[in-house]
Structure formats: structure tokens, C-alpha cells
Amino acid sequence: MRRLGALLTVVVPVALMGASGQRAAVASYPAPTFRVATFNIHKGADRPGRYDLEQTIDLIAHLDADLVGVQEALRNHAGFGCDDQPALIAEGLRQRTGQPWTSVYAQSWVTEDRRCLGRGQGDDVETEGVAFFARDRILESRWVRLSEGRVGLAARVASMPDVPVIVTHLAASRQDQAGRAQELGRLLPWAAQQRPGVLLGDLNARPDADELAPVLARYRDAWAEADARGVARGVLSGSTRPGRRVSRIDYVLYSPDVPLTLQSVEIVDPATLPGLGGVSDHFPVVATFLRGVPGDTVTPVVGTR
């Protein structure tokens, strides 16, 4: 039986707020853009379900994002090598990019499964959760329990310290609409306490779903806005689920008051990339913002990376 346990946070390496509540010093970051991504990694498996965490890491590195929020990250799962996936992904990103990636992980599902410990592998019971991977330092992270097996995780990064970014993974299936509504009823007030920011994740609902109405009343839907302005890239149907009818359930959403201006959004089909195939059963969504005051126009930026 699964139960929800205490939060487990893994940060490698990371500067957090001290007991005085003061933030760590903010490093300089010259890039004029801030790129965020959401990706349901399907437990590190490809579309048919074969475990291949290296391919997952390759795709995350390809996204070239400053901050990536993922869902379905595992620790100590006997069917997935007993791996500490957040730690392995962060280390893999450092090796591939030469940059000091940091991470934070919030466990949502916790089981009593101790098979990895019985094999002399892993360090605890099996868990599943959400995680952030940041190109630079994560200054602060917080979490909120939404329901049995669902959490919201907020982080602030050194390159954009005044913009909290929240990742979540809401209840699955069309039949669990009430569950998602309940989770959002807990998440949205908590998010409002963090200051205007970005909300991303697998919401398991299409944009016209009733339970998303309160979300879209508070946040702008980055892909819909980019599509309307002709700066949507990648999977132009908007679908974030490969091999299905158009099903957009993965989102990057942002507050109108956040000091960012949307530049473009891409839904990435890894099958179109060299050396990659059907990585995960979701497509990543990447949004590129210009840093600065909020704006209603999309301004091209050339040569930012």
C-alpha cells in the first residue's frame, strides 16, 4: 500500500537560506533570457517502458533550459535499478554540459517497498516525486502537500531570485477531476503566498477542463499565447502526449505580474532529434522569457546562447 510520507529533499550542491532567513549571495548571470521547462520523465523509461535514464538525461541537456521541473522521478525503486534518479540526472547534466547543475527533490508517493535495501542497494524505501534541476544555484525551496501522493514544489534560482517557480503533478485520469480540483484548491493559495511567479507541470487536464478555470484566471498559458502570436515551435498541434489525439496536459504558466516577457515556447518531440527516439510518454515543454519588466509583446532575441 502506498502512503504519503515526509518530504525528502536532495540538493546537490545547493545554497539554501540560513537560520536567519537571509538568502545566499546571488551570482551574476549575463544571459538576457530565462528558459524554463517541464518534463514528465516517465520514471526514466522510454515510450514502450524500457528503462534508459541516460537517454532521459540527454534530452534534458538538449533542452538548454535554466530550470527544468520534472515529474515521476524515482528513488530506490527495484524495477528501475534502485537508482537515485534526481542525483544521477544532476550529475549527468554536469558531465554533459560542464556546468554546476543543482537539484531539489520532493517525494510524493512513498511505499513500504524495501527490496533495494534488501539487495544492499539504495538508502531507503521506494519513493516517487517531482524535482527541479537548475543550471546554477537553487537558493531556496519549499513544498506543500496537495493530497495523498501529490505535492507542489517551489524553488528560486540565483539567476532569477525574485521569481518563484513551482512544479507539480496533479491526479491522473479523466475520472479524477474532483481530485485535481481539490489539489488546485490547495496549490493556488499557497502559490499566491510565494509572490508572482511561474507554475509548470503535468496537470493531467486539457485547457478547457473545468478544474483548470481558476488556474487560467490567474496565470497566462505560455503555449497558447505563443501559438496566437506565431512563436510556438516544435509540435505545432500543442499535444504533449505522443501517439495520441491532440492532448495538451503539460503546461508552463506565468503570472501577468512576473518580471518576464514571453519570447517563444517549444513542445519538443525527441524523435526529431539526432540520437534520441521515443524518450518518455510525454513531450517536454520549454518556454523562453526575456528578463525585465512584464510585457505584452513578444520580442525576438538573436544570439542569446
Image (tube, helix red, strand yellow):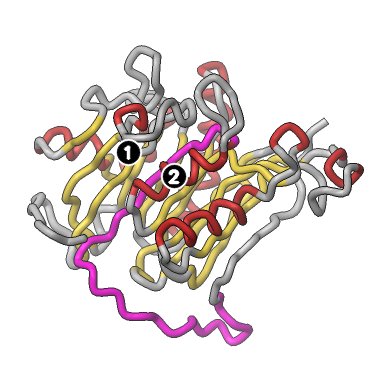
Q: Nearer the viewer, residue 79 or 223?
A: 79
Badge 2 element: helix
Is residue 207 rendered to the left or right of residue 226?
A: right
Q: Which mark is residue 216?
A: 1
Residue 282 percent across, percent down from the top left: 44, 29
Q: Is residue 189 visible?
A: yes
The residue indicated by pointer 2 is 58
Q: Residue at x 83, y 42 (%)?
A: 116
Kind of residue at badge 2:
Asp
Kind of residue at badge 1:
Leu
Upstream in sequence: badge 1 or badge 2: 2
Q: Nearer the viewer, residue 80 or 125?
A: 80
- The secondary structure that most of the magenta stretch takes on is loop
Q: Nearer the viewer, residue 125 or 118?
A: 118
Residue 240 percent across, percent down from the top left: 37, 27
The magenta span reads 16-43
Q: Residue at x 31, y 41 (%)?
A: 217
Q: Is residue 218 visible?
A: no
Is residue 141 rendered to the left or right of residue 263?
A: right
Give the number of the mark in front: 1 or 2. Answer: 2
Q: Residue at x 19, y 51 (%)?
A: 262
